[in-house]
Amino acid sequence: MSSDEPSPLRRWFSGLCPARPLRQRLQQAIEERHAMQAILDNIPAPIFAKNVEGLYTHCNRAFLEYLGLPREGVIGKTVHDVAPPDLASVYADADRRLLAAGGRQIYDAQVQWADGGLRDVTFYKAVWYNQEGQPAGQAGAIFDITERRRLEKELRLLAETDDLTGRLNRRSFLQQADRMFLRAREHGACVALLLFDLDHFKELNDAFGHATGDAVLCHVCDLVGQQLREEDRFGRIGGDEFAIAAYGAAQVHTIAERLPELLDQSPFLFGDRFLPIGISVGGAIVDPAEVRLDEAIARADRALYEAKRQGRRRAVIFERPAPDPADDLR
C-alpha cells in the first residue's frame, strides 16, 4: 500500500464524518436566515407568513410597523393576538378559505395602521406546500393603495363634474338621473326633472364680462344647492342651463316654486352694486314605468318654454304629457 493512500481505518472514519462539519453548516444556515430577513426588512410592503395553525412564522419590519408590535409580539402568535377583534375574525375567515381552496387570494380592505390612520390596502396571499404536496402555510403581502385610491377619486370627480361650478356635468347628470329612473321604476315611485336657466344671461355677460358671468353662475349654484336634498341630483348641462332630478312630487313643487323667489331675493354683489338675478324653471313629474328619461327632459323643456312665455322668473310644472309648442306652428 502506498504511503499516500489512506488506510482502511481512515477511510472508515471519513465515511462517518461529513465533508463539512455540522457547526459550519449550522453557521451557514444562520447566515442565510439573517440574509433573508435583511432582504425582507428592506422591502417597504408588510410581508408575513403563517403555518397551517395560523401562527405567524415570519414577518418583515414593515409588518411590525403596521401592527406597532415588536417581533416577539408577532412570531408564534395568531391574528387574534395582534389585530382588533372585529378585523381578526374577518382575517381568520379569509385564511381558512384560502387554505381550504389553495392557490392565491387577493382582496381589498381598509385597515388601521399603528399610527391610527386608516389606509386602503390590497392583500396578496398564497398557500405554500411541503414536499409531500400538503398545505404547509400561507405567505402574504399588504400593499398600501391609499394614494392610488385618492387619485382615482380625483380623476373620477374631474370626469363627472363641471370645471366651473363643481356640479355634475351633463354626461354624469344624465347617467345618475337614469339610475334614479331605474330605482323609481323598481319601487313604483315618481321622478321629477327640473330645468332652469338664467333670464337675460347673455346681456349680463355682454355688459359685465365673462368673468362676472362665471361668478354669477357659481353664485346661483351655491344658492340652489342649499335648497336640495342629499338624494337629489344637480348638474350643469349647458352654458347657463341646469337640471335637477329628484324624487317626490310635493317636495319638487316646493323646490321649483321657491327657486325663482330665492334668486330674486339674492342679487349678486358686483363691486358696489347688486346685479339682479332671475331664473325660469320648467319641470315634469313622471312615472318612470311609463316615461323614459329623454321624454321627461323633453317635457321639462316644454315647461321651461312655457315659464318664459308667461313672463319669466317663475316655475311651470307639467304632471301629464305636455303639448309640444311646435304644434302651435302647424
Image: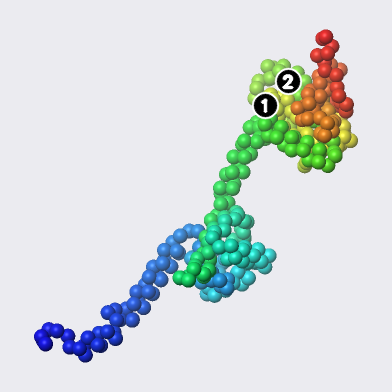
Q: Amino acid at mark 2?
A: Phe
Residue at 62% x, 43% y is 153
Screen quadrant of the C terminus:
top right
Vertical position of residue 315 compared to residue 124: above or below: above
- Mark 2 Cα shell of 10 Å, populated few (<14), some (14-19), many (≥20): some
Screen quadrant of the N terminus:
bottom left
Between 3 and 269, the residue placed more toward the observer is 3
Q: CA distance from mark 1 to mark 2?
A: 10 Å
Image marks 1 and 2: residues in contact by CB distance under 8 Å? no
Q: Which is more N-terminal, label 2 or label 1?
A: 2
Vertical position of residue 252 compared to residue 114: above or below: above
Q: Amino acid at mark 1?
A: Asp
Between 262 and 8, the residue placed more toward the observer is 8
Residue placed under numbered mark 1 in the picture: 214
- Mark 1 Cα shell of 10 Å, populated few (<14), some (14-19), many (≥20): some
Which percent across, then down, holds residue 84? 65, 67
Residue placed under numbered mark 2 in the picture: 201
Which percent across, then down, holds residue 307? 84, 21
Q: Residue furthest top?
A: 330
Give the image quarter of residue 168.
top right
Between 63 and 289, the residue placed more toward the observer is 289
Which percent across, then down, holds residue 173? 71, 33
